[in-house]
Image (cartoon, helix red, strand yellow):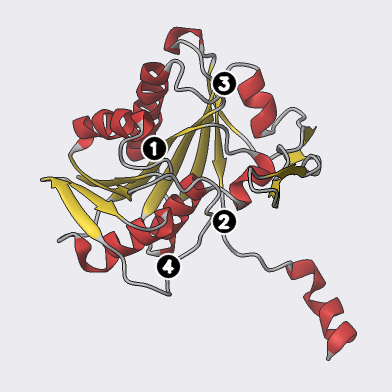
Amino acid sequence: MHILVSNDDGYTAPGIKALAQAMRRFGRVTVVAPENNHSGASNSLTLTRPLSVTQVECDTYVVGGTPSDCVHLALTGLIDDKPDLVVSGINGGANMGDDTMYSGTVAAAIEGYIFGIDSIAFSQIDRGWGELDSAARMAGVIVERFLERKDADEAVLLNVNMPNMPFEAMRGVMATRLGRRHNAEKMIHEQSPRGMSIYWLGAAGQPKDAGEGTDFWATHHGYASVTPLQIDLTEHRLVGQADRWVC
């Protein structure tokens, strides 16, 4: 089996090193990851300049671009053979609920899914890489079960979030839906040392829909949350009404 590993924290991040190592027991691993951190890059592709690629090890390529760039390049000629699985992460921070719309970690997995390959994004809830070995071990368990039990013919896209706790303390794995957050906190206005106005985006909103069955609930109660995703953004229920509104 051939597994492609990417992330959004950059190729030197502890999370991607731990994930790549955990995947090696399943087969050959190729890492194609960004040169720098691209958290919040979502599904952006770089179309206004060429992309640099540096091979730093026999199985590791560093791309001067976004997570989506990395997987896109890998699947359109950078690597010799099509991978059987794309995994992304392990991200240092949660990608739950509304976060998935902005996440570069999830975007790397989405790019693999678009190309018809089973793809899984892995994230830890808290920043700082606490209990990273346990998260990598859980990622291995989830991949092993998925490879053994998946029976669907079409590609699958999964978003996994894991609490920062010892492996033995985790209560297991739970299939979930995405929760929702409140709106982001107010932006922060500051002045640069030269007196110019600068602005920071506010912190993510607190969980709004965190009831049982959501990714928020599962991780809060000690489970690794596994949410199947889709990329069809069509609101099918409103197609008929849209016809009346504008046609």
Q: Where is residue 83 in the image (x, y as percent from the top left)?
A: 25, 53
Which of the labelled discs sits on residue 203, or is there none?
none
Q: Earlier in the sequence, mark 2 or mark 4?
A: 4
Q: Quadrant of the N terminus?
A: top left
Query: Callout 1: helix, strand or loop?
Result: helix
Q: Position of residue 13 (x, y in %)?
A: 36, 34
Foreground label between 4 and 3: 4
Quarter where residue 12 is shown: top left
Amino acid type, mark 1: Phe
Q: Mark 2 points at which residue?
A: 230
The local crowd at label 4, few if under 14, some if 14 to 19, many if 20 or more residues have their Cα within 10 Å, is: few
Foreground label between 1 and 3: 3
Please tell me which residue lies in front, 153 or 94.
94
Amino acid type, mark 2: Gln
The local crowd at label 1, few if under 14, some if 14 to 19, many if 20 or more residues have their Cα within 10 Å, is: few
The local crowd at label 2, few if under 14, some if 14 to 19, many if 20 or more residues have their Cα within 10 Å, is: few
Amino acid type, mark 4: Thr
Give the alpha-carbon distance from disc 4 to disc 3, as whole Å: 36 Å
Q: Where is residue 23 in the image (x, y as percent from the top left)?
A: 26, 34
Q: Name the residue under label 3.
A: 223
Q: Mark 4 points at which residue?
A: 46
The local crowd at label 3, few if under 14, some if 14 to 19, many if 20 or more residues have their Cα within 10 Å, is: many
Q: Earlier in the sequence, mark 2 or mark 3?
A: 3
Give the alpha-carbon distance from disc 1 to disc 3, as whole Å: 17 Å
Describe residue 223's horizontal placement relative to residue 75 as left or right.
Answer: right
Q: Earlier in the sequence, mark 2 or mark 1?
A: 1
Q: Name the residue under label 1.
A: 146
Q: Earlier in the sequence, mark 1 or mark 4?
A: 4
Describe residue 126's horizontal placement relative to residue 190 as left or right.
Answer: left
Residue lying furthest right in this view? 245
Residue lying furthest left in this view? 58
Q: Earlier in the sequence, mark 1 or mark 3?
A: 1
